[in-house]
Image (cartoon, rainbow, N blue to C red):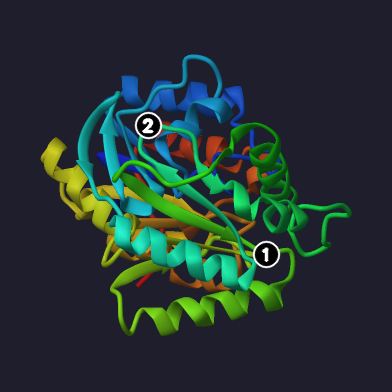
Amino acid sequence: MTFKPKAIFLDMDGTILNHYNQVSIHTKEMIDTLRKNGIYVFIATGRSFDEIEGVVPEGFQVDGFVTSNGMAGYVGKDVVFEHSLSSELVQTIIEKARKNKVYYELFPYGESRITLKQDQLFVEHEIREPKPESVGINEWLSRKQAIQEEINWTEKIEGNRFSKFYFFARTKEHINQWKKELDLLKQDIDFTTSVSTEHNVELMVANVNKATGIKEMLKRFDLTEHEIMAIGDSDNDIPMLRFVGYSVAMKNAPDKIKEIADDITEFTCDEDGVYHYLKSILNTGTLTNIVG
């Protein structure tokens, strides 16, 4: 059985981004070539829209973006869809994060991420050197950069448009305890959580994930899930990989991600794995090893 994708959705961290948060010029050029050959290419990421420009090469272009784990979608800078956390949920979560001394970033749409000044001490304490051995270098560098340059340390929360919360802990025990607190809170307030590493968890609107975001984007382009392929590497990619017609796991993905995928890249994210895989699509036009 062969599969010829009409569109491809690409995760960022651990997929097109290497472990130093860079997209290679080869990957950028391959995306350009695929688009010139009539294949749509989209980004599907846990990152917010405002984070993307800083980690891609100059001139990087795709047909659309599904961001914040499905919370928003964009074509160019035009909003295709957008979900927002309620102000009540935001306040409740911040109070609980403070009680548990959990590092948090709140992402308003179109503005810098927020952490309250009164929580700055324990948030910064989580990013103290040395880096814990089990924390990936990409996540550690992102947190260091956030602390130094990207967080708006503010006295109070203003506005009512928020895409997600990001939480981090330097120990697995701390983040796992926080996940338990969030699960308890779900009994009273409906929301969705997603993880991309063993040291983080993100919070979105209920029943939102990458798959729901992709589904909304497909309506804009008159495509179906059976016509698309997706490449990812971590837990927050699972809904996407299960949704699409052809799923690909990165070589650097955990075994549980590889087990649900139709194919696995030959190379890791640090070896331009996506570039090499997309090149094979361009050369053959089809994929032939669909599982099952």
Between 208 and 253, the one lying in front of the other is 208
The crowding category of the residue bearing disc 1, from other C-alpha atoms within 10 Å (few below 14, some 14 to 19, many at least 20), is: many
Name the image quarter holding the C terminus. Answer: bottom left
* Amino acid carrying mark 1 in the image: Ala
Residue 169 is tagged as 1
Residue drawn 34% across and 66% down? 242
Residue drawn 67% across and 64% down? 169
Q: Quadrant of residue 222?
A: top left
Q: Residue furthest top?
A: 59
Check the image and report above or below for 267 versus 168: above
Residue drawn 31% across and 50% down? 71
Name the image quarter holding the N terminus. Answer: bottom left
Check the image and report above or below for 172 versus 232: below
Residue 255, percent across and down? 59, 71
Q: Which badge, 2 or 1, comes first in the chain's sequence? A: 2
Between 136 and 256, the one lying in front of the other is 136
Labels 2 and 1 touching (C-beta < 8 A): no
Residue drawn 14% across and 38% down? 220
Q: CA distance from mark 2 to mark 1?
A: 26 Å
Residue 135, percent across and down? 74, 59
The crowding category of the residue bearing disc 2, from other C-alpha atoms within 10 Å (few below 14, some 14 to 19, many at least 20), is: few
Q: Quadrant of residue 207?
A: bottom left
Residue 87 visible in the snapshot: yes
* Amino acid carrying mark 2 in the image: Gly
